[in-house]
Amino acid sequence: MKNSDSLIIREANQRDVLMDFVRLPYRLYKNNHYWVAPLIFEEKRNLTAKHNPFLRKNPVVLYVCYKDNRPVGRIAGIINKVHNEVHKDKTGFFGFFESINDEAVAERLFQSAVDWAKKQGADTLRGPTNFSLNDVAGLLVEGFEEPPFVLMPYNPSYYEQLYRKNGFDMVMRFFAYELTQDTIRFPNFVNRMEKRLEENNIIIRQVNFKELGREFGILLDLFNKCWNENWGFIPFSFDEAVGEFSKVKAFAKPDLILIAENKGEPAGFALALPDINQALKPLKGRLLPFNWVRLMHNIKKINQIRVVLMGVLKEHRNKGIDLMFYKKIVENSRRHNYHRAELSWILENNRMMNRVLEHINAQKNKVYGIFEKKIM
């Protein structure tokens, strides 16, 4: 515990402090029209090692800042062992940052994360990641006037200033693009592309949920191979990937999860999800006693999707597979009455994918950042 003036930092290693950590955002965003409250029981599960394999493998600390005995901020300090092994560095991470608009509160939170990360041997602090770049990550810096899509972050606009006041600089930007069934425009050659791909023994199929174990292994292998050159990449372990997919399996659609095959061998994949945030937003984080009924009703009214992941093996790039993925997702979305899509997140330095999205008339509507500072 650290005491400075009227601010107290407590580690969330006791039930009451942990519950303050979980519940703080629900109070901070109470009057925000755009924030989507996650289900409280899911938030608690995500912070326990029993349900989150990341916590069983990596050091993590959770802090809550109190002012006059009221929680006013929170932060997590994170060491991602796989990241540091892959990138041969000593980076510490922070995540789950929330704060009232108070520079003193933010300073205490960030300093607590810095002090802890130093003790773990880190020379850099980077974030936000909840808990890694494979989870919900990034600070929203443009595009605040809209609720976030599924598995995307949301935060007040003043957070960027709090970051910068504490010595953090943006080291990477990534984008979200918007498309609707009315605005999407495919180049003329795309209509001939599917036949050309088939002539070259490349087909695109949807996943088979009846053989989900096998299909899941294919998708995981493709992700780790397709994304391994991306900035900040860390491979998904099988148990971590299963944990993430379990969060979305109940509302995922097989025809929005696509695999490209070349002579029967996997060549690429695309994953799009119905935007469950549309169904969750009215529930304000609670399912009981009767909100689960509302949730089932709300799911039927979802009319938009998020294209979450897409990748093509290096030897099959520049063949139009990525464009065909988008065409198939658009066609299959119509059958479910999904009329709008967000394509996120796209790294700023992923020039190929940014060009593809511009070619189909996607409009950039949100910008996110990853920030860091040297701490040794």
Image: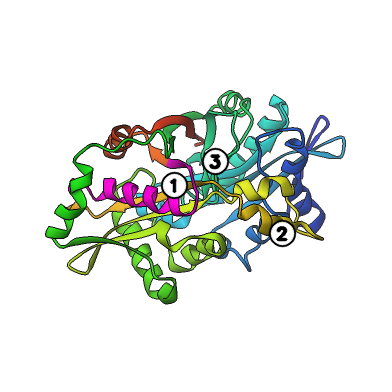
278 to the left or right of 274: right
Which tag, 3 or 2, sits closer to the chain's start?
Answer: 2
Q: Which residue is mark 1?
A: 90
Q: Distance from label 1 to label 3 (Cα)?
A: 16 Å
Q: Is residue 278 left or right of residue 306?
A: right
Task: Tell me if label 1 and label 3 are in contact, CB under 8 Å.
Answer: no
Q: What residue type is disc 3 on?
A: Pro
Q: Quadrant of residue 146?
A: top right
In the rendered image, residue 317 lying in the magenta stretch gets the answer: no
- Name the residue furthest left: 199
Q: Position of residue 161 (x, y in %)?
A: 59, 23
Please state which amino acid type lies under the numbered disc 2: Phe
**Can you give x and y, in whole percent of width and height, for residue 297 in the image?**
68, 56
SS at mark 2 in the image: helix
Of the two numbered discs 1 and 2 in the rendering, the one whose residue sits closer to the viewer? 2
- Magenta range is 319-344
Mark 2 = which residue? Answer: 41
The local secondary structure at tag 3 comes to loop
Of 200 and 38, nearer the camera is 200
Q: Residues within 10 Å of mark 1 (few under 14, many from 20)?
A: some
Foreground mark, 3 or 2, reads 2
Determine the CA span between mark 1 and mark 2: 33 Å
Residue type marked 1: Lys
Query: Residue farthest to the right?
Result: 68
Q: Is residue 151 above or below residue 154?
A: below
Q: Which residue is mark 3?
A: 128
